[in-house]
Image (cartoon, rainbow, N blue to C red):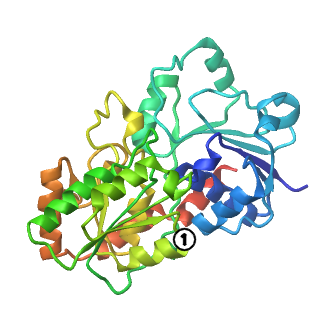
Amino acid sequence: MTNRAALYTPYADTLGGGERYLLTLAQVLLDNSWLVDVTFEDEDLLNRARDRFNLSLKGASLVDRAFLEKRAYINHYRYNLLFWVSDGSIPTMMAKKNWLHFQVPFHNLGGKSLFNIMKLKLVNRVICNSRFTKKIIDAEYGTSSSVWYPPVAVEDFSPGKKENLIIAVGRFETTMNVKRQDVLISVFKKLVDEGLTTWRLVLLGGSLTREEDNSFLQKLKVQAQGYPIDFVVNASFGQLKQTYSRARIFWHAAGFGIDEGKEPERVEHFGMTTIEAMASGCWPLVYEAGGQKEIFKKFSQKDFCLWQDEEQLLEKTRKIIAKTPAIDSLINLANNFSVTNFANNVKKNL
């Protein structure tokens, strides 16, 4: 008898890191001869996900979110595995095996209510995407969650012929986890104004609306006018991979200006794009908050990768431009977060 899994997300249309996590799990299951249903609204959205995340997902089927949300006892029972991305609430999960995933460090939601405690007894495993997320989730819900770091297809990325490019990758949206491209534009303009030449800043990111209708993106473009700054909107996986391979430096500013103790949901919960950049031979300069710090916890040169204010980003960028350290150790570090490691974790727990 063939095993069947259902993968539920309330955020399918964002096509962000959480959706990559869920769909990579789908691919792992498909590769191991499982039947897989995913809660994407239509085939067009699933095809966009295939292109953005470079996943074939051959054989994946669509299932309506309402089918999994209602009549749980009847509709869940047909599945050997139910993987559910939480929006902060605890669902009633009734499959043979139930995995509840938190990609956001939800807090102050009354997570230890009696009703939640009862529903959590049906959950076989609570999974978080980082130790940063785990600490907050366990305190909120009284759980003892596992950390399964997000799967990054590091084998798909490699250094190419390097150019004088600084890149940043993140959605052009004013969502909960804003990527703060405005800060990066401001810092790059200062570098240019003080005499930096022959370098370009390339900002890649997704937009849920048409480019011309995205007011946040349009404000960024106005801010960047007159400077060597390029925008690449809704890049394909091929475009992303090629740009990474050419870039020398990777910038990341999500969480800038946020007190992570008070608003942990607004900082970077892990940092998949940081791993992609390192696998491509880009030197990362990322804001020191949230899950990003975990990536470099045991890295001897972490002080060259983390920054806390704009002046530090300026200073460290100048140093990397003057002399980029050897990148082999960064590539080796990126390999710790491979799809292979993630797949092995999944298969051990099926």
Where residue 110 sits in the image (x, y, percent)? 52, 16
Q: Is residue 184 above or below residue 330?
A: above
Q: Residue at x 72, y 64 (%)?
A: 57
Q: Residue at x 42, y 44 (%)?
A: 269
Where residue 229 sits in the image (x, y, percent)? 30, 67
User: Which residue sits furthest top?
Assistant: 114
Amino acid marked by disc 1: Phe
Where residue 265 sits in the image (x, y, percent)? 42, 35
86 relative position to 215: left or right: right
Labels in figure, total = 1
Q: Quadrant of residue 27?
A: bottom right
Where residue 230 sits in the image (x, y, percent)? 36, 69
User: Which residue sits furthest right?
Assistant: 1
Q: Quadrant of residue 97?
A: top right
Q: Residue at x 58, y 65 (%)?
A: 52
242 relative position to 289: left or right: right
Q: Can residue 276 be seen at all in this image of the molecule?
A: yes
Q: Can residue 295 be seen at all in this image of the molecule?
A: no
Q: Is residue 303 above or below residue 199?
A: above
Q: Which residue is mark 1?
A: 237
Q: Nearer the viewer, residue 114 or 89?
A: 89
Q: Which quadrant is the N terminus positioned in?
A: bottom right
Q: Nearer the viewer, residue 251 or 119?
A: 251
310 relative position to 331: left or right: left
Q: Residue at x 82, y 51 (%)?
A: 4
User: Helix or strand or loop: what does disc 1 sit on?
Assistant: helix
